[in-house]
Amino acid sequence: MLEEQKRAGFRPVTPAIVEELKSIVGEQHILFDDQEKLKEYSHDEVAEEMYHGLPEVVVKPNSTQEIAAIMKLANRELIPVTPQGAKSGLSGGGVPIMGGILMSFERMNRILEIDRTNMMAIAEPGIITNDFSAAVEKEGLFFAGYPMSLLTCYLGGNVANNAGGGKAVKYGVTSRYILGLEVVLPSGEIAFYGGKRVKDVTGYNMVQLMVGSEGTLGIFTKIVVKLIPLPKAKTDMMVLFKDLDLAIAIVPKIMTEVGVTPTGIEFMDRLTLETSCKHLGESLEQYKNAGAFLIIEVDGNDAEQVLNDSLDIGDYCMQNGAIDAFVAQTPSDQEKIWKLRRNAAEAFKAISPRQTLEDIVVPMSEIPRVLPVLEGLSIKYDVFIPCYGHAGDGNLHVTVVKNPDHSEEQWLEILPKILTDLYSEINKIGGTISGEHGIGNKRKQFLTLVLGDSEIESMKSIKRALDPNNILNPGKIFDL
Amino acid sequence: MLEEQKRAGFRPVTPAIVEELKSIVGEQHILFDDQEKLKEYSHDEVAEEMYHGLPEVVVKPNSTQEIAAIMKLANRELIPVTPQGAKSGLSGGGVPIMGGILMSFERMNRILEIDRTNMMAIAEPGIITNDFSAAVEKEGLFFAGYPMSLLTCYLGGNVANNAGGGKAVKYGVTSRYILGLEVVLPSGEIAFYGGKRVKDVTGYNMVQLMVGSEGTLGIFTKIVVKLIPLPKAKTDMMVLFKDLDLAIAIVPKIMTEVGVTPTGIEFMDRLTLETSCKHLGESLEQYKNAGAFLIIEVDGNDAEQVLNDSLDIGDYCMQNGAIDAFVAQTPSDQEKIWKLRRNAAEAFKAISPRQTLEDIVVPMSEIPRVLPVLEGLSIKYDVFIPCYGHAGDGNLHVTVVKNPDHSEEQWLEILPKILTDLYSEINKIGGTISGEHGIGNKRKQFLTLVLGDSEIESMKSIKRALDPNNILNPGKIFDL
């Protein structure tokens, strides 16, 4: 048993408890004693081992009732329960850092209903987001709230993190599409908040309190998702600029001056563009004078209108400092553009596996003020800090990459200093630490840099109200 | 002092407390002892006196700090505080039913910032929604989350109720546009949740927990509102159908078959249409075969596209049972159509001031199943139950009108029975009691008809966590 776990007043998972868990979910849906297999559930996409944690037992429930029974047992025995999705998280939110019971949703992956008339669907948390998207698209419907990791992530994880993605400028993030949740509360009681209703003010908005609560307030067992008609046409445009300041300055004007709200506006700085090209074996020739790269996606129902909107945006960009603009109308041309952006994280990992993918968000207009901050930090600490992300949302995936000349000890020493400096500066310009990846285990030590006592204490009071034993996903977002 | 107030453990407002309140907000911003003036603050738009309540003192603070000081005093002295906006509420949510301190926001009506680059504005809660809308429209921006009562209501009330309105089909309700809130918590502490950021997952979504909490969890002092580019063109279409079933059946198909998402889809039944026409002195001639009336609003940036979308919808309606369709492109023609819908509530009030305006919401596809329920209730209880509302959202303003032949006693006896029957039936088809008007004082006795113990108890636990003395707006949504 971990020291931390003991300190927090939790008890160990005994063989008797394992037997009781077996009686709830069935013997074949329990992992225990097999350290290699348990280890697979000990981490998400965060590489640093200090953010990993080994579960004592893994359970794979298959129903709301089984989950409720597990939570009742956990409360009775004071054993922590960590809900875990696809392990594609970027903040350690689904990692069992206090040991105890790891609850995996891999078996709860059904679509329970696709309701074409109301444009809604009900699904379980363990469905892969892309499978869910594909199923509703067959019905001419569209789930607009998905993140970049849709090929691997689970819908439940999207909801738990209030995931963003590449279409948030026009369509918003996951939360906008979640109308109802069946939830097993930390106590083991089952609640159904909201429902198949686009408007509902009957009591507090528990649905939106649950969305983004990172598995600390309740376990989602059924998710009611609002869908929209599948747009019939889209274009992706690549626009090159001499420098990032010029590129970023144009972003709000696309909406206010051109009058078009694109689906998404992504950007990459020069370093990201180069690294991504090299990683993919692409020539840099066509980007030779480009200090920054924008991807602007426009969609709609009328192909001609969509193309005209794109051309209007392209013209505006060219009149305002762009050095090149190219509208991709075919899926293969579109894929060519997006590939560079989607592979950015992988490309940096290939250079140095030691890096931290950050998720700061600032008012869109303040992005230019972030860039000198990054430059200053990169000089001060002698590291690379490339930057890419969702320009239209002010959500920047600043990536601090370990200098290969630095020792592991140096890296571990400077990393918290870099992040403290970064977050403090971001806070000064109205920004915060996470736009879509969450706080989890990785960022909780920095929460006080951007939130005050009254904000944090009020959040903690809600956690205590719903989870008096601190049984559900303890040690995430904050320590109680 | 009221019996109820004493039972709840509250203390009366003494002259000493009035002196202290004067020292906080200034003598001229306090009302005390003048029963006539106090009475003006004793009700909202709900007519029944049983839902009214006289405050002991009215305070009109002018700053966050003054509000914080009042809340600290109220906690120390155990005096209830009821925040009140424009008194345009439809559920008694801002009525001081436990006496105590009535906090009016009439002085806090400033727009603090309009940020055109980020398309956001920051305002105080006491600004009239229409004043706020007009100010942002001057900057080419649009606040899409406003309710029908925008000429009188306050922005703070819109947020407290998570108001809906006539544009929710396309633009969603108020909550979608609220990105940040400065809040005085019940304890008197000041918190700032969210900010000028379109994405934020740094801790729990306290902003959306506060939105729609009906002034029971915190007092909003600054509201960060997301705006969108002002649409350049709109059309309003009137479509007549022989009966309501035909009209309602077409609503989802406008989106799924025609592929257009209108701004709003409103409907009126025959009784509402007749009553509204009579009230306005309009001829019924052009509506003579109409059993139902739809208003379909379409907007966008391209006038031609908007007109084409409207014509597509009109054609589809005519091919599917409509008896007439008329697209209004000029403001005066548009006003003519909307006037009938906007005056519906007034028209019924003119016939019988004794009526209850309801706010049920069901999955859009279930609207046809509501109609026979209303017919059954109207026969069983011998009352008129006209129906109009937001068809595109499934949000129906069922209006139970007192039969002039019934005595006041009869009306008061049957009304709760009618509502119990109505809500129970609505619950069976996946609906709930309030889509946009709130629970407040008027509907709390019916909450258990649509929510179970675990839902209500979890909401109460949050109320207790943030307001342990039950000081802020007690007796609303539920009794603790």
Image (cartoon, coloured by chain):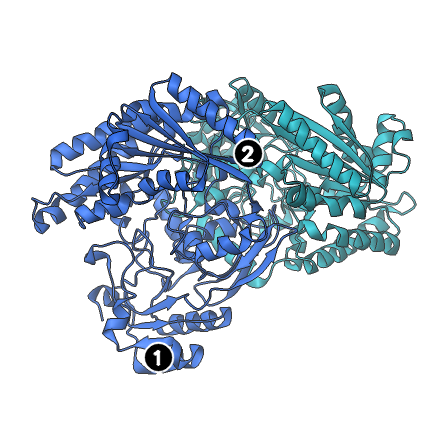
Chain colours: A blue, B cyan
Q: Hey, which quadrant is residue B418 in on the image?
A: bottom right
Residue type (three-letter) at the residue carrying disc 1: Ile
Residue type (three-letter) at the residue carrying disc 2: Ala
Residue that appears at 49% across and 43% down = B208
Q: Which residue is mark 1?
A: A17
Q: Nearer the viewer, residue B93 or B281?
A: B281
Q: CA distance from mark 1 to mark 2?
A: 60 Å
SS state under label 2: helix
One can see residue A11 in this view: yes
Numbered disc total: 2
Residue B355 percent coordinates (x, y): 79, 42
Q: Earlier in the sequence, mark 1 or mark 2?
A: 1
Q: Nearer the viewer, residue B272 or A115?
A: A115
Q: Is residue B270 left or right of residue A187?
A: right
In the displayed structure, A350 sits above or below A420; it is below
Residue A47 percent coordinates (x, y): 22, 54
In the displayed structure, B265 sits above or below B407; it is above
Location of the C terminus of chain A by quadrant is: bottom left
Residue that appears at 52% across and 41% down = B211
Chain to which mark 1 belongs:
A
Q: Which residue is mark 2?
A: A303
SS state under label 1: helix
Q: Nearer the viewer, residue B313 or B345?
A: B313
Is there CB contact under 8 Å for labels 1 and 2? no
